[in-house]
C-alpha cells in the first residue's frame, strides 16, 4: 500500500483561521479602548463591541479582562519590535563581529548607526500607527502595572541597551554607567516628545500637520543631536 509523501501540505483548519482573526480583532480593539478609557474605565463589552465579536470570545481567548490587558501589552511590544527587527539585528551582528575580531567599532560607525536608530524611532513616533499604542503606554508610564513590565522587558530595555552601547562608544565610557544611560534616555526623549507631547510641540513649532517636511526636520535634529555626543568635555 502506498504512503502519502510527507511533504504534502495539510489544509488549514478554517476554524483555527477564524479564531486567529477573532483574537487579532480583540487585540487591535483593546489597544484603542484601553488607551482611551484606561483599565478601570474600559469594559469587556466595550472591547467586544469595538472588535465586532461576541463577548464570550474574551474569556475564551484570554481568560479574563486582566488576561486581555496583558496580552494587549505584549501585542504592542511585538508590533514595535517588528519595526526595529532588521536594524537592531544588523547592529547586534556588527557588535558581535567587532567583539569576535577584537576590533572595536569606531566613533564614525557608531554615530552612523545611532543616527539611523534615532531617525527610525522618530519615524515611528510620528506615525498614525503609533498613536493608539502611545495612549496605552502613557497610561502605563503614569501608573505601571504588569503590562508595563512586559513591554519594558520585551522592547524598551533592549532598545535602551542598544542605544547606550552606541552612546558609550562615542563617550568612551562604560555602557552601564549612569551618565551613559542618562545621555541615551535624553537622546531618545528628544524625538519621543513629538509623540508624547505632540500638541505642545506642534503648537510651539507652528506645525498644522506632521508630514514629510516635518519628518525631515526631525531627522535632521536627530542627526544633529547624535553628532554632538562626545564633542563636549566629560563631566568632572
Image (tube, rainbow, N blue to C red):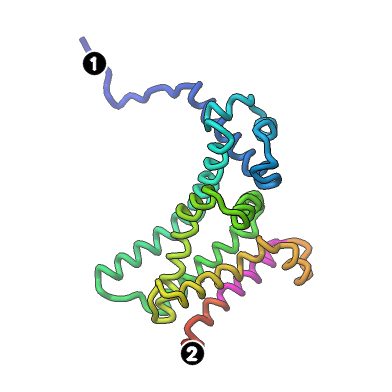
Relative depth, front residue between 44 and 198: 44
195 to the left or right of 172: right
130 to the left or right of 107: right
40 to the left or right of 16: right
Quick one: label 1 or label 2, which is nearer the N terminus?
Answer: 1
Residue 105 x %, y %? 35, 75
Relative depth, front residue between 64 and 48: 64
Residue 155 x %, y %? 48, 55
Give the secondary structure at mark 2: loop
Viewer-nearest of discs 1 and 2:
2
Residue 233, label in figure: 2
Query: Which residue is painted at 45% across and 75% down in the image?
Result: 178
Q: Which residues are magenta?
A: 210-224
Residue wearing tag 1: 3
Number of numbered callouts drawn: 2
Callout 1–callout 2 Cβ contact below 8 Å: no
Amino acid at each position: 500500500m502506498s504512503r502519502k509523501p510527507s511533504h504534502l501540505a495539510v489544509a488549514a483548519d478554517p476554524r483555527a483561521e477564524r479564531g486567529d482573526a477573532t483574537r487579532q480583532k480583540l487585540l487591535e480593539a483593546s489597544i484603542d479602548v484601553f488607551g482611551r478609557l484606561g483599565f478601570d474605565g474600559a469594559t469587556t463589552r466595550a472591547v467586544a463591541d469595538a472588535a465586532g465579536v461576541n463577548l464570550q470570545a474574551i474569556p475564551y481567548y484570554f481568560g479574563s479582562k486582566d488576561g486581555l490587558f496583558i496580552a494587549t501589552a505584549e501585542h504592542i511590544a511585538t508590533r514595535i519590535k517588528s519595526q526595529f527587527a532588521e536594524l537592531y539585528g544588523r547592529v547586534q551582528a556588527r557588535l558581535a563581529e567587532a567583539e569576535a575580531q577584537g576590533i572595536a567599532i569606531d566613533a564614525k560607525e557608531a554615530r552612523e548607526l545611532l543616527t539611523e536608530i534615532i531617525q527610525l524611532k522618530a519615524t515611528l513616533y510620528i506615525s498614525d500607527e503609533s498613536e493608539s499604542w502611545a495612549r496605552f503606554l502613557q497610561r502605563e508610564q503614569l501608573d505601571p502595572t504588569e503590562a508595563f513590565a512586559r513591554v519594558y522587558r520585551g522592547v524598551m530595555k533592549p532598545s535602551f541597551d542598544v542605544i547606550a552601547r552606541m552612546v558609550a562608544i562615542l563617550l568612551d565610557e562604560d555602557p552601564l554607567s549612569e551618565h551613559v544611560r542618562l545621555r541615551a534616555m535624553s537622546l531618545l526623549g528628544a524625538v519621543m516628545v513629538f509623540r508624547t507631547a505632540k500638541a505642545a510641540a506642534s503648537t510651539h513649532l507652528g506645525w498644522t500637520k506632521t508630514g514629510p517636511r516635518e519628518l525631515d526636520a526631525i531627522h535632521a535634529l536627530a542627526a544633529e543631536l547624535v553628532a554632538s555626543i562626545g564633542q563636549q568635555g566629560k563631566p568632572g
